[in-house]
Image (cartoon, helix red, strand yellow):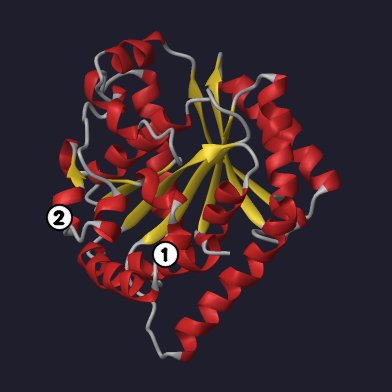
Amino acid sequence: MLDQAEALRQLAKDADEKDRAAGEKKKGPKIITVTSGKGGVGKSNFVVNLAIALQIKGQKVMIFDADVGMGNDDVLMGFLPKYNVYDIIFNNMKIKDVVIEGPYGVKLLPGGSGLTRIEEIDEDKRENFIKKIQDLEDLDYILMDTGAGISKSVLGFIACSEELIVITTPEPTSLTDAYSLLKAVNYFKIKSSAKMIINRTLSSKEGIETYNKFNNTVNNFLKMKLEHLGSISEDRKLVEAVRKQEPFIISFPNSNISKEIIDIGNKILGLKEETAGMGAQGLFRKIFSIFSV
């Protein structure tokens, strides 16, 4: 798997050069990949609630559930989607019939099995899909929720994005797996920086101390720049919200975790560059280039 991953950085670079050579002006939403070194650290909950926080602030946000075979963003939002990317590519469905609109207008594009069959997509189907994706350019952010761990798909989605957010908890196993993921990203030169979220902290002090220790390790052994985007408290209200299949920022808007996610959203808004992102079409051109290898 990691032998294949070495081609990711070059493929992503080639896709960028192809766009420039064709005179395509970069436009559209900022692409952010959210991932983790292991499962069960609250990644999807973070993505769904962050998307709503950004939407509340007047941004147009879409979640691309890129967790191949195990995506659950729809469940957390209280949906049961009938269709996914597969249906757009292979069954000629329209984007508007597949994308789901959630709370406050947040959009969700389920990835589904279409992501596992990219090698079967011929050039005509790819171009047809890219044309349809143009309908998604009226967005400010696309948040890609990937699977956990180190795999070709996770590293591929990181290579396709403009920003990387890694979720971890203070637990030693979670920190070790997060470090292993960043080590692979650094080794293959996929990204030179990442933003960190420390989830399920018992106090703000624990979040800062966990990040500082982790950052020291990265500074000592990896050539990567980290930034602490924020910490999220351990809170029973999150469990209650999941059982209700409703994002906690809606169920408990005045809770500490909701305030923390809003603060993180504000930081992301403050970091957004004036230049627009690669856009949805640029994103999927890269995905097709990388995952067809």
- Disc marking residue 283: 1
173 on left or right of 95: right
Residue nearer the viewer, 256 or 75: 75
At which x and y percent is residue 201?
56, 19
At which x and y percent is residue 126?
35, 70
Query: Residues at badges 1 and 2 in contact (C-beta under 8 Å)?
Result: no
Q: Is residue 36 visible?
A: yes
- The image quadrant that residue 82 belongs to is top left
177 on left or right of 152: right
Residue nearer the viewer, 107 or 124: 124
Q: Looking at numbered disc 1 in the image, what kind of residue is underneath it? A: Leu
- The secondary structure type at the circle numbered 2 is helix
User: Where 282 falls versus 240 (above or below)?
Assistant: below
- Disc marking residue 250: none
At which x and y percent is residue 194?
61, 50
Q: Is residue 274 visible?
A: no
The residue that label 2 is drawn on is 96
At which x and y percent is residue 78?
22, 26
- The image quadrant that residue 190 belongs to is bottom right
User: Where 163 falls versus 126 (above or below)?
Assistant: above
Residue displayed at 22% across by 36% down: 81
Residue displayed at 58% across by 78% down: 14
- The secondary structure type at the circle numbered 1 is helix
Quadrant of the frame with the C terminus = bottom right
